[in-house]
Image (spheres, rainbow, N blue to C red):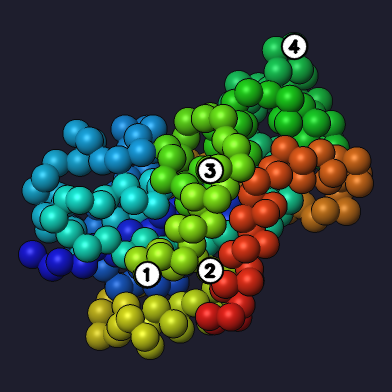
C-alpha cells in the first residue's frame, strides 16, 4: 500500500475541474482513484462508512467535495490539494450554471413563488433570488472557509471568525497545498516538478474511461458571466454574503503568489 494519499479537496466553482482533466485524470487510473463526490461523503467532516476500507487501502488519489482533514488518522499520509477563486467569480460561475439548468431544477434552488423560467434570462434578478434562497448556502456561500476549516462541504453550518482563523491556520500546514485559479498552470508545474505527480504516469488514453464524476451539470454548457453582467449593488451583496471567504481568499493569495504565482 502506498502511504501517501493525494486528496483533491475540490471546492465547487473554483475551476478545479481543469486540474482534474489536465493532470489527475491523465496520471491516475480510475481503479486507483477513490471518488468522494456523493452526499455520503460531502455531508461529513470525517470519513465514516462512506468508503469501504479496501478502496481506501488501494487508492492513490481521492477526488471529491471533502474538507481538509477528511482522511486523517486512517493509516495513510494525506496530501490535500485545493483551488480557490475570488468569491464573486465563484458565485457568478454558479449563477451561470443555474441559468443553464432545466426549469424544474432551477426552481428547486429558488425561494418559493419565484418564476424560474423568467429568471433564467435575467442574471441580476436571478442573483438576488439565489442569495435569498436557502439551497445555495450549502453549496456556495463561504464554502472555501468551510472546507479549509475541516467542516462538511455540503452542510450549511453557521460560521464565525473563529472558523476563519482555523481555515487560515490550515493554509500553512505542510500537507495542504492551495492554489488560486489564475495560478493553475504554475501550480500544475509545481505538482509535477517538485512532488513528482504525473511524472512517468501520463496515460496515453488521456481522460478516456473516466466517468463524468461531477454529475450531469457538467454536461450542460453554463452561461459565462462577468462582474459587469450584474449591478454593483449585487456585487456588494455577493461579497457580504461571502465575507469569510473574501478574507480567506486574500490570505490564500498572499501565500500562493509567494509559492508559485
Q: Residues within 10 Å of mark 3 (few under 14, many from 20)?
A: some
Q: Residue at x 83, y 53 (%)?
A: 227
Q: Are marks 2 and 3 in contact (CB under 8 Å)?
A: no
Q: Residues within 10 Å of mark 4 (few under 14, many from 20)?
A: few
Mark 1 = which residue?
174
| 74 lies left or right of 180 | left
- Spatial separation of the CA atoms under disc 4 and disc 3: 34 Å
Q: Residue at x 44, y 82 (%)?
A: 190
Where 113 sits versus 139, above or below?
above
- Spatial separation of the CA atoms under disc 3 and disc 1: 19 Å
Mark found first going from the N terminus, 2 or 3: 3
Mark 2 = which residue?
179
Badge 1 marks a residue whose secondary structure is loop
Q: Position of residue 261 (x, y in %)?
A: 60, 80
Mark 3 = which residue?
163
Q: Are marks 2 and 1 in contact (CB under 8 Å)?
A: no
Residue found at the very far top of the displayed protein: 113
Mark 4 = which residue?
113
Mark found first going from the N terminus, 2 or 4: 4
Mark found first going from the N terminus, 4 or 1: 4
| 61 lies left or right of 147 | left
Q: Position of residue 95 (x, y in %)?
A: 70, 41
Q: Position of residue 134 (x, y in %)?
A: 63, 23
Mark found first going from the N terminus, 2 or 1: 1
Mark found first going from the N terminus, 4 or 3: 4
Q: Position of residue 240 (x, y in %)?
A: 77, 40
Amino acid at each position: 500500500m502506498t502511504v501517501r494519499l493525494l486528496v483533491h479537496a475540490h471546492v465547487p466553482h473554483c475551476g478545479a475541474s481543469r486540474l482534474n482533466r489536465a493532470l489527475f485524470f491523465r496520471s491516475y487510473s480510475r481503479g486507483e482513484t477513490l471518488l468522494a463526490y456523493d452526499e455520503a461523503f460531502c455531508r461529513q467532516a470525517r470519513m465514516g462508512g462512506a468508503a469501504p476500507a479496501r478502496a481506501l487501502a488501494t487508492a492513490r488519489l481521492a477526488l471529491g467535495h471533502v474538507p481538509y482533514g477528511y482522511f486523517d488518522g486512517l493509516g495513510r499520509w494525506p496530501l490535500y490539494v485545493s483551488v480557490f477563486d475570488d468569491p464573486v467569480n465563484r458565485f457568478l460561475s454558479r449563477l451561470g450554471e443555474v441559468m443553464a439548468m432545466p426549469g424544474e431544477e432551477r426552481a428547486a434552488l429558488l425561494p418559493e413563488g419565484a418564476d424560474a423560467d423568467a429568471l433564467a434570462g435575467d442574471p441580476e434578478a436571478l442573483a438576488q433570488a439565489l442569495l435569498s434562497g436557502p439551497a445555495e448556502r450549502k453549496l456556495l456561500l463561504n464554502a472555501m472557509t468551510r472546507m479549509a476549516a475541516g467542516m462538511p462541504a455540503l452542510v450549511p453550518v453557521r460560521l464565525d471568525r473563529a472558523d476563519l482563523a482555523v481555515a487560515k491556520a490550515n493554509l500553512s500546514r505542510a500537507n495542504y497545498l492551495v492554489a488560486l485559479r489564475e495560478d493553475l498552470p504554475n501550480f500544475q508545474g509545481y505538482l509535477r516538478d517538485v512532488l513528482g505527480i504525473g511524472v512517468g504516469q501520463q496515460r496515453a488514453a488521456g481522460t478516456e474511461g473516466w466517468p463524468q464524476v461531477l454529475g450531469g451539470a457538467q454536461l450542460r454548457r453554463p452561461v459565462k458571466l462577468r462582474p459587469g453582467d450584474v449591478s454593483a449593488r449585487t456585487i456588494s451583496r455577493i461579497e457580504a454574503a461571502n465575507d469569510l471567504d473574501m478574507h480567506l481568499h486574500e490570505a490564500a493569495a498572499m501565500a500562493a503568489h509567494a509559492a508559485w504565482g
